[in-house]
Amino acid sequence: MKTIYLVVPCYNEHDALPLTAPVMLKKLRELTDAGKISPESGVLFIDDGSGDDTWEIIKSLRARDVRVSGLRLSRNRGHQNALMAGLVTAMDWCDATVSMDADLQDDINAIDEMVEKLAAGAEIVCGVRSRRDTDSFLKRVTAQGYYGLMNLCGAGIIYDHADFRLLSREALRRLCRYGTEDLFIRGLITRLGLPIEKVYYERSARAAGESKYTLKKMLHLAMRGFSCGKMKPAADMRVDELYAAEVLHG
């Protein structure tokens, strides 16, 4: 049985975490009881410099359940940096990570198939949206254009895949060769030299709260996508400063 950690970036998730954290812990229990993952598995919540009581909520979750770990960044670093900080932190605790957002729009039941593919030898398993029929026509067209343009620029991203994915420890090790700051992770996983499997799922509405991706943040993410096609891995793994203020684990 593999030890799995859910890695969950959080930014001002006062409304969502009390609803979604119990669902994540329930899924870990189901997989453990079914003998699919190790009892040492857990979930790591990363507080990305929230302005609300997100960190206090994480600490209270930790006090009630030892499977909860927490990482608090000293200031807001942005979703991709917070995610990377969580992946690097969890890498030493587990055999694989599953990254997902705190709002549970990603189908948590898809993790079952990800774990099965890991057991069968997969190193990277990407969650891919099965359809976009709930999106407006304009959003579908702009999404298709975005992915097409990214791939023309060498980003090599998988259509309708965001940051819901399983990465083995070897995949994490190779990813870290690109550093840990300002990465466009979904544009790098296709360049790690490891086979990629896919799991298809339907994306839901947010359980609570509002999306933290403003137009400015989305444009910044797009610019990083353009630049990632030119990135080269270092000869040795680099793990830069994670800007962590506090870690709850063990």
Image: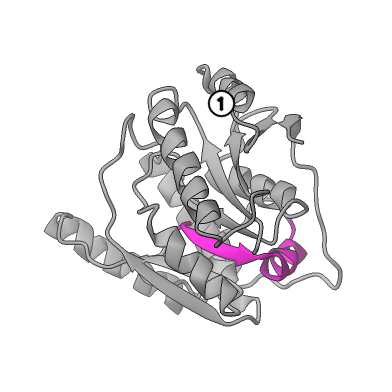
Instruction: Residue 78 in the image: state x and y as whole percent.
Output: 56, 40
Instruction: Residue 200 in the image: state x and y as whole percent.
Output: 34, 69
Judge whether residue 168 is colored magenta.
yes
Compared with 9, 92 (above or below) is below
Question: Circle 1 sits in a helix, a strand or a loop, which is it?
Answer: helix
**Residue at 29% from the left image edge and 63% from the top image edge:** 143
Q: Left or right? Give the position of 141 relative to 65.
A: left
Name the image quarter holding the N terminus: bottom right
Q: Does residue 1 show up?
A: yes
What residue span does the magenta drawing correspond to?
A: 162-179
**Residue at 62% from the left image edge and 27% from the top image edge:** 62
Residue kind at label 1, given as amino acid type: Leu
Name the image quarter holding the C terminus: top right
Q: Left or right? Give the position of 103 relative to 48.
A: left
Judge whether residue 98 is colored magenta.
no
User: Mark 1 — residue?
Assistant: 61
Instruction: Residue 101 in the image: state x and y as whole percent.
Output: 45, 45
Q: Left or right? Give the position of 222 relative to 246.
A: left
Instruction: Residue 94 in the image: state x and y as whole percent.
Output: 71, 55
**Residue at 51% from the left image edge and 74% from the top image edge:** 117
Nearest the viewer among 211 and 55 is 55
- Mark 1 packing: few (<14 Cα in 10 Å), some, or many (20+)? many
